[in-house]
Amino acid sequence: MTDVPTSGSAAAAKLVVLVSGSGSNLQALLDACQDPAYGARVVAVGADRDGTYGAERAAKAGVPTFVHRVKDHATRDAWDEALTAEVAAHEPDLIVSAGFLKLCGPRFLAAFPGRYINTHNSLLPAFPGMNGPGEALAAGVKLAGATLFICDAGVDTGPIVAQCAVPVEDDDTVETLTERIKEAERAQLVAAVGRMVRDGWSVEGHRVRLG
């Protein structure tokens, strides 16, 4: 069982956010953190490639950024070690994957047990991987959605923090369903992260308890 203490103090919990693209989930967190009652602040934003709009959003908000590209390291393990050290230097209470398209390795996961979360555009364990909305449409399900989970060594297999359902409409395309899921996903991410940092959370086996 992993217990994560509540932030519970006057100091806001520290978030490190990892991005690979436009950073719309990052922006939602940056906006939420403007309210002191939210209980968190983004202390750094990392990327796995140069020139991401997510990093640009962070810079505009005055948040430090860093980049670690896999190809700049001799091995994937060396990249994982460098990323782990960079993130650890910011002493985060919680690390958020906001569209980060790299799987972090064993060093990273061991350094931040129960503290690295990711969001996925399906109701896991259904439709893991890169095309959740498309697979939901192909399967003919009536409910799609988004899942926030704690990362483990698998692909979209970690303990679930929160889920929200998004109805599948008869005239949905992959694009329209994806966009509606993104809207629900952002709201869920902001709400769940706020609750985690204010009330704490614990992980027992494959179950996450908030508060």
Image (cartoon, rainbow, N blue to C red):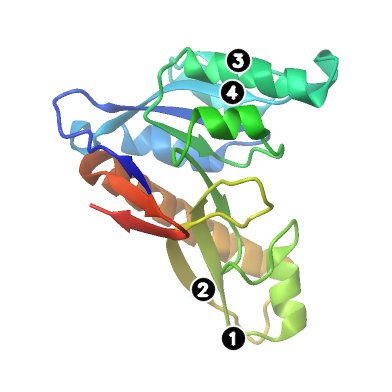
Structural crowding at the residue carrying mark 4, measured as other residues with C-alpha within 10 Å and reported as few (<14), some (14–19) or many (≥20):
many
Residue under label 3, please give it.
66
Q: Nearer the viewer, residue 63 or 11?
A: 11
Q: Which amino acid does the dot numbered 2 rest on? A: Val
* Res 36 seen here: yes
The picture quadrant where one finds residue 129 is bottom right
Of the two numbered discs 1 and 4 on the same chain, state the one appearing first in sequence: 4
Of the two numbered discs 4 and 3 on the same chain, state the one appearing first in sequence: 4
Q: Which amino acid does the dot numbered 4 rest on? A: Gly
Circle 4/circle 3 CB separation < 8 Å: yes
Q: Which amino acid does the dot numbered 1 rest on? A: Lys
Measured in 3D between alpha carbons, the distance from the residue under mark 1 to the one under mark 3, in whole angstroms, is 41 Å
Vertical position of residue 101 compared to residue 68: above or below: below
Of the two numbered discs 2 and 4 on the same chain, state the one appearing first in sequence: 4
Residue under label 1, please give it.
142
Of the two numbered discs 1 and 3 on the same chain, state the one appearing first in sequence: 3
Residue under label 4, please give it.
46
Measured in 3D between alpha carbons, the distance from the residue under mark 2 to the one under mark 3, in whole angstroms, is 34 Å
